[in-house]
Image (spheres, helix red, strand yellow):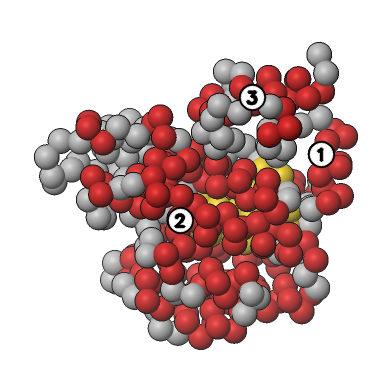
């Protein structure tokens, strides 16, 4: 079996599952059209070394197993983050670690696995595992890490960004830890749960997994946000293109950042997560720093890719 044949088999074989026919483009038969394999676990040593010479960024997609309405599959968060990371690596370079299924919180609904309690910013499980993943990525020669969480309770977001900030300091390489929707706030996607945003993304990334006809009458069980019946593949594509383009730009640039740039980047990220963590003052709801998120942080994604970290610092004061 030739190399290209073996790669094709990886992409179309059962192991690749839905990703092969969706994230990589369905129905492609010409091997020249096959996108490069960027999933770390499917690569041979020489392929990893070659890819890292071009771009030494590693994507870490995070999600969990959680009820996402009757119309979506249970793995939405990790599937979504994984597909976005794959598309970004194929566009801008870098490799993609296997998605992590498990995180902080999850709806109290059927079929949900909760590894750390909801609102648990102390996180005994996700935080140390994420730290270890970052340390191993750095030990293996990666010069930048992009953690993308498709699961986003408030505590999950805080733990992910706070860990990234601390790992940037400890490892001396830039580590970004963000939910995917933060990169598309200016597209009108403010994050939701199994509603218009997530469902539109899934309609674009994994069309076979969404079945709107399974939705019963509103209020829909375990769905939060704009009516998922308004979801469209076109909206999912638009949000995807924005997120992927920004991630690709970051993956290319981050390994080249000098120490001063890394410090400016991390100062903004640290301010953001500090605000999210302290805003409730131990008394108010953990989500209080998100009340104004859509307006204050609207330019976050654009500012990040332009390395305008001072813009982010200013925006954080509005939260
Ligand atoms: Zn979700």
Front residue of 194/241: it is 241
Q: Of label 2 and label 3, which has the lower sequence position?
A: 3
Q: Position of residue 181 (x, y in %)?
A: 45, 59
Element assignment for label 1: helix
Q: Residue at x 30, y 32 (%)?
A: 211
- In terms of image quadrants, where is residue 17? top right
Tell me how far mark 3 sits from mark 1, CA to CA.
25 Å
Q: Is residue 245 above or below residue 229?
A: below
Q: Position of residue 258 (x, y in %)?
A: 80, 73
Whether ligand 1 has any atom under 8 Å from the Cβ at mark 2 is answered as: no
Element assignment for label 3: loop
Q: Of label 2 and label 1, which has the lower sequence position?
A: 1
Q: Specify few, some or many for label 3: CA neighbours under 10 Å numbering under 14, 14-19, or 20 or more.
A: few
Tell me how far mark 2 sits from mark 3, CA to CA.
27 Å
Q: Nearer the viewer, mark 2 or mark 3?
A: 3
Q: Residue at x 62, y 43 (%)?
A: 86
Q: Position of residue 34 (x, y in %)?
A: 68, 33
Q: Residue at x 59, y 62 (%)?
A: 246
Q: Which residue is mark 2?
A: 239
Q: Which mark is residue 48?
A: 1
Q: Which residue is mark 3?
A: 29
Q: Position of residue 189 (x, y in %)?
A: 38, 61
Q: Specify few, some or many for label 1: CA neighbours under 10 Å numbering under 14, 14-19, or 20 or more.
A: some
Front residue of 76/267: it is 76
């Amino acid at each position: 079996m030739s190399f290209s044949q073996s790669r094709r088999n990886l992409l179309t074989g059962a192991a690749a599952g839905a990703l092969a026919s969706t994230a990589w483009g369905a129905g492609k038969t010409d091997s020249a059209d096959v996108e490069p394999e960027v999933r770390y676990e499917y690569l041979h040593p020489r392929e990893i070394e070659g890819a890292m010479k071009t771009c030494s960024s590693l994507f870490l997609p995070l999600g969990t197993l959680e009820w996402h309405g009757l119309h979506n599959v249970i793995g939405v968060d990790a599937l979504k983050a994984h597909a976005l990371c794959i598309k970004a690596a194929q566009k801008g370079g870098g490799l993609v670690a296997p998605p992590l299924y498990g995180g902080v919180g999850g709806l109290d609904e059927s079929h949900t696995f909760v590894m750390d309690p909801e609102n648990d910013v102390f996180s005994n499980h996700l935080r140390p595992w994420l730290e270890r993943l970052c340390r191993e990525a750095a030990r293996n020669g990666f010069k930048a890490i992009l953690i993308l969480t498709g699961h986003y309770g408030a505590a999950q977001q805080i733990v992910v960004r706070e860990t990234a900030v601390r790992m940037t300091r400890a490892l001396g390489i830039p580590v970004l830890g963000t939910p995917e929707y933060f990169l598309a706030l200016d597209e009108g996607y403010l994050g939701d749960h199994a509603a218009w945003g997530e469902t539109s993304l899934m309609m674009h990334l994994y069309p076979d997994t969404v079945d709107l006809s399974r939705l019963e009458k509103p209020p829909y069980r375990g769905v939060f946000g704009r009516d998922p019946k308004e979801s469209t593949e076109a909206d999912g594509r638009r949000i995807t293109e924005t997120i992927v383009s920004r991630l690709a730009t970051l993956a290319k640039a981050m390994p080249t950042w000098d120490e001063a740039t890394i410090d400016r980047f991390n100062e903004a990220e640290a301010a953001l997560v500090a605000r999210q963590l302290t805003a409730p003052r131990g008394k108010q709801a953990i989500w209080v720093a998100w009340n104004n998120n859509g307006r204050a942080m609207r330019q976050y994604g654009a500012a990040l890719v332009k390395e305008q970290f001072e813009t982010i610092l200013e925006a954080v004061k509005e939260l």
